[in-house]
Image: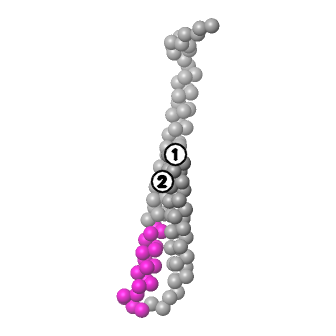
Amino acid sequence: MKNHRRLCAGLLCVALVLLLFVSSAYIVCEARHDCAGEACAVCAQLLQAKALIECFALTAFLLLTLFAALTLKREYDAQQGMLRASGRTLVSWKVRLNN
């Protein structure tokens, strides 16, 4: 079951990267098209691709910020735990040593 989830997550990541790559390539290829006016289908697709890339960029930034904050909090908590534990003795921890 765990490998199935890992495979699905990997496939979704690959699909996301391909989607972003294709959107970027489409924007680059059609950047200098002959516009037909207000009802230009290419302009509408370019705007939609740009919006998709901006949406994923914001989401990626927020996820990276969250990941960094959680990592820093975990490191801080671990360091505080070591500082608190360094002043304790076996008696204060109520540990019984049996031979």
Q: Which mark is residue 61?
A: none
* Residue 65 visible: no
- The kind of residue tagged 2 is Leu
Specify few, some or many for label 1: CA neighbours under 10 Å numbering under 14, 14-19, or 20 or more.
few
Q: Residue at x 53, y 30 (%)?
A: 80
Question: Which residue position is annotated with label 1?
Answer: 2
Specify few, some or many for label 2: CA neighbours under 10 Å numbering under 14, 14-19, or 20 or more.
few
Q: Earlier in the sequence, mark 1 or mark 2?
A: 1
Question: Which residue position is annotated with label 2?
Answer: 63
Q: Is residue 57 above or below residue 82?
A: below
In the rendered image, residue 35, in percent from the top left (x then y), is placed at 45, 90
Q: Residue at x 56, y 32 (%)?
A: 79
How many labels, in total? Answer: 2
| Residue sitting nearer the eye, 89 or 1 | 1
Q: Marks 1 and 2, how far apart in space?
A: 23 Å
Which stretch is magenta? 36-54
* Residue 35 visible: yes
In the rendered image, residue 90, in percent from the top left (x then y), is placed at 56, 13
**Disc 2 secondary structure class:** helix
- The kind of residue tagged 1 is Lys
| Residue sitting nearer the eye, 43 or 3 | 3
